[in-house]
Image (spheres, grey):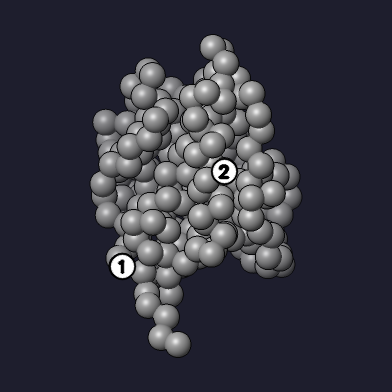
Amino acid sequence: MNIPPARSAPERIVLEGRYVRLEPLDLRHAADLYAVSTMPGGAERYRWLFSDAPQSLAEMEARIEMGNAGSDLAVAIIDKASGRALGQQSWMRIRPEHGSIEIGGVYWGLPMARSRLATEALYLFARHAFDDLGYRRFEWKCNNRNEPSKAAATRFGFSFEGVFRQDMIIKGESRDTAWFSMLDSEWPALRAEYERWLDPGNFDAAGMQKTKLEAQGAR
C-alpha cells in the first residue's frame, strides 16, 4: 500500500471561524498580546512555555520577529467579537512527507482560556490539517507535570501515547514530555462532535455551554 504524504505544509493564510479568526502572527498583534500577557494572572500562563512573559512591548515585538524567522508557523487568535488578539498558537514539527504535524507554542490568554474561543482555535487547526492539507496525524505535547494541558488534550479528543523521559531542559528544569495525538481515521467523528458543541445553540446568552464537549466518546 502506497501511503500518500500530506499535500503541503501550512501556509500563512487566515483561518476563519464563527468565534475566532486565526491570522499569521505579525507585529500588529504585539500590543494586544503584550496586554493579555501582562494582565493579572496572564504571566502565570507562561509557566510551562519555553519563555516567560514578555517584560515590554519591544520584547513582544522581538519575539514575534524571531519566531517568524524560524521553522514554526505561528498564528494570532483574534476574538471576532472584540477584534483583539487574545492568544497565539503554532504549527510545529511540520512533516508533510510523513503526514504528521503538531499544535504547540500555545498561549491562550485568560479572556479566552477554557472557553469556546480556545476550543474553536484548536478545531480550526485540526480541520485545516486533516480536511484541507491531508495530514494523517495531529500531535499535542506538553510537560508531563502540566496537568491542565494534559486534561485539555484529553478533553479535545487526543489519545495519550506515553512519556519521553528527560526529553528537554526548559528554564533550567528537566522536562519529561507527554505525547498525545489524533489520527485522520478518528477525525470525522471528532469533527462532528466539535461542530455540535460549537453550534451557537449550545451556549446561553452569557456564552456558557449547555452541554459538554464529548470528544473522547466520539472517537
Q: Residue at x 42, y 28 (%)?
A: 19
Is there any visible trace of residue 109 in the rendered image? no
Between 104 and 161, the residue placed more toward the observer is: 161
The amino acid on which the numbered mark 2 sits, given as a three-letter code, is Glu
Question: As shown in the figure, which amino acid type bears the numbered disc 1?
Answer: Arg
Q: Residue at x 30, y 65 (%)?
A: 8
Calculate the distance from the C-alpha at mark 2 to the C-alpha at mark 1.
25 Å
Q: Mark 2 and 1 residues: CB-CB less than 8 Å, in contact?
A: no
The location of residue 216, given as percent across then percent down, is: 68, 50
Q: Which residue is mark 2?
A: 193
Q: Which class describes the residues within 10 Å of circle 1: few (<14), some (14-19), or many (20+)?
A: some
* x 73%, y 50%: residue: 145
- Residue 14 in the figure: left or right of residue 199: left
In the rendered image, the quadrant that contains the C terminus is: bottom right
Q: Which residue is mark 1?
A: 7
Which residue is pictured at 51% across the width and 33% down the height? 198
Helix, strand, or loop for circle 1? loop
